[in-house]
Image (cartoon, helix red, strand yellow):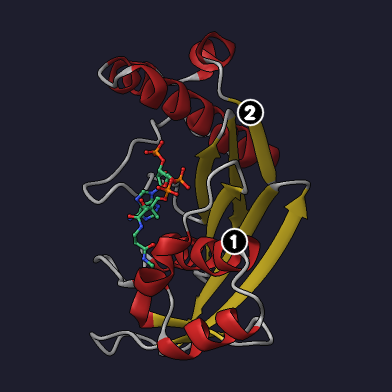
C-alpha cells in the first residue's frame, strides 16, 4: 500500500501523534516539513491496511522509522513529495523505498563511491548516464532501508551488487543472511521510485 503526501507542513500536522509533533517541532525548517509529510504518508499507508493503533512512528537510533508489529513499512522524501510504502508482513519480509529526481545537477562523481567495479564498467559501456547511475544508487538506498530490520548496522554500497538483469546479490561483510531481494523500479517523468523487498531465507 502506497501513501503519498506533498511536503507542506500545515497539510499534515494535525494527523500526527502528539509525540511525533514534538519531535517534528525540534527539527529545522525543511527537515520538519519532510518529517511531517513522511509520517503522514506512512500513517496513511498503514491505515489503508487496517492498522488501528495509536503509537507514534518515531525514528529509531539509526533512523529507521518504528513500524507496528505485523507490518513492514518505509518512507522517502524528495523535492516536495513524501512517499511511504507498507504491507502486512506475517512472514517477516521487509520493504524499503527510495525516491530520486534527475534534476539540473548531474552528480556522476558519486559513481566511484556507489558502484562496484563490475557495475562501474557496465555503467561506462552503457554511456555513463546520470539516470542509470541514479537507478543503482537509489536501489542501494532502498536495499539499506529494507534490510535494516534484519541487519541493524550501516551497510556499505559495496555490500550489494546490482546485476545487468536487475537482480540483487548481497555480499554482506558480517555474513548475515541469506536474503531474497526483489526490486521494483518506476520512472514518472524525471522522478524515480525504487521499492526493494527483503526476505530472510534462513531458519
Ligand atoms: C538513510 C538513507 C538511506 C536515507 O536516504 P536519503 O535519500 O538520504 O533520504 P530519503 O528521504 O530517501 O529517506 C529518509 C528516510 O529514510 C528512513 N531511514 C533513515 N535511516 C533508516 C534506516 N537505518 N533504516 C530504514 N530506514 C531509514 C527514515 O524514515 C528517513 O526519513 P525521516 O528521517 O523523515 O524518518 C541515506 O541517507 C544513507 O545513509 N545511505 C547510506 C547507506 C546506504 O544506502 N547503503 C547502501 C547499502 S547497499
Q: Nearer the viewer, residue 201 or 84?
A: 84
**What residue is pinned by disc 1?**
130
Mark 2 = which residue? 5
Where 89 falls versus 172 (above or below)?
above
User: x, y (%) of residue 69?
Assistant: 44, 52
Q: CA distance from mark 1 to mark 2?
A: 26 Å
The residue that appears at 54% across and 70% down in the rendered structure is: 136
Q: Secondary structure at mark 2?
A: strand
Name the spot of residue 163 as percent of width and height, x first.
Answer: 59, 87
Residue 144 in view here: no
Classify mark 1: helix, strand or loop: helix
| Res 186 seen here | yes
Task: Name the residue located 50 percent from the left edge and 14 percent from the top edge.
Answer: 9
| Quarter of the image where the C terminus is located | bottom left
Decide: is 174 above or below 150: below
Residue 62 falls left or right of residue 7: left
Amino acid at each position: 500500500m502506497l501513501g503519498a503526501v506533498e511536503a507542506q507542513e500545515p497539510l499534515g500536522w494535525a494527523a500526527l501523534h502528539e509525540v511525533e509533533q514534538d519531535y517534528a517541532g525540534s527539527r529545522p525548517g525543511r527537515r520538519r516539513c519532510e518529517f511531517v509529510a513522511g509520517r503522514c504518508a506512512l500513517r496513511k499507508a498503514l491505515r489503508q491496511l487496517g492498522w488501528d493503533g495509536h503509537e507514534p512512528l518515531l525514528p529509531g537510533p539509526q533512523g529507521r522509522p518504528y513500524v507496528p508489529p505485523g507490518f513492514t513499512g518505509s518512507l522517502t522524501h524528495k523535492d516536495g513529495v513524501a512517499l511511504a510504502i507498507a504491507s502486512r508482513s506475517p512472514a517477516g519480509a521487509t520493504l524499503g523505498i527510495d525516491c530520486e529526481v534527475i534534476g539540473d545537477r548531474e552528480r556522476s562523481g558519486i559513481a566511484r563511491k556507489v558502484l562496484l567495479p563490475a557495475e562501474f564498467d557496465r555503467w561506462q559501456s552503457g554511456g555513463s548516464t546520470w539516470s542509470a547511475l541514479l537507478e543503482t544508487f537509489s536501489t542501494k538506498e532502498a536495499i539499506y532501508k529494507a534490510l535494516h530490520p534484519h541487519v541493524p548496522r550501516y551497510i556499505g554500497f559495496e555490500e550489494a551488487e546490482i546485476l545487468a538483469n536487475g537482480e540483487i546479490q548481497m555480499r554482506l561483510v558480517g555474513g548475515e543472511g541469506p536474503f531474497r531481494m526483489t526490486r521494483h523500479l518506476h520512472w514518472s517523468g524525471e522522478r524515480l521510485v525504487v521499492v526493494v523487498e527483503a526476505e530472510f531465507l534462513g531458519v
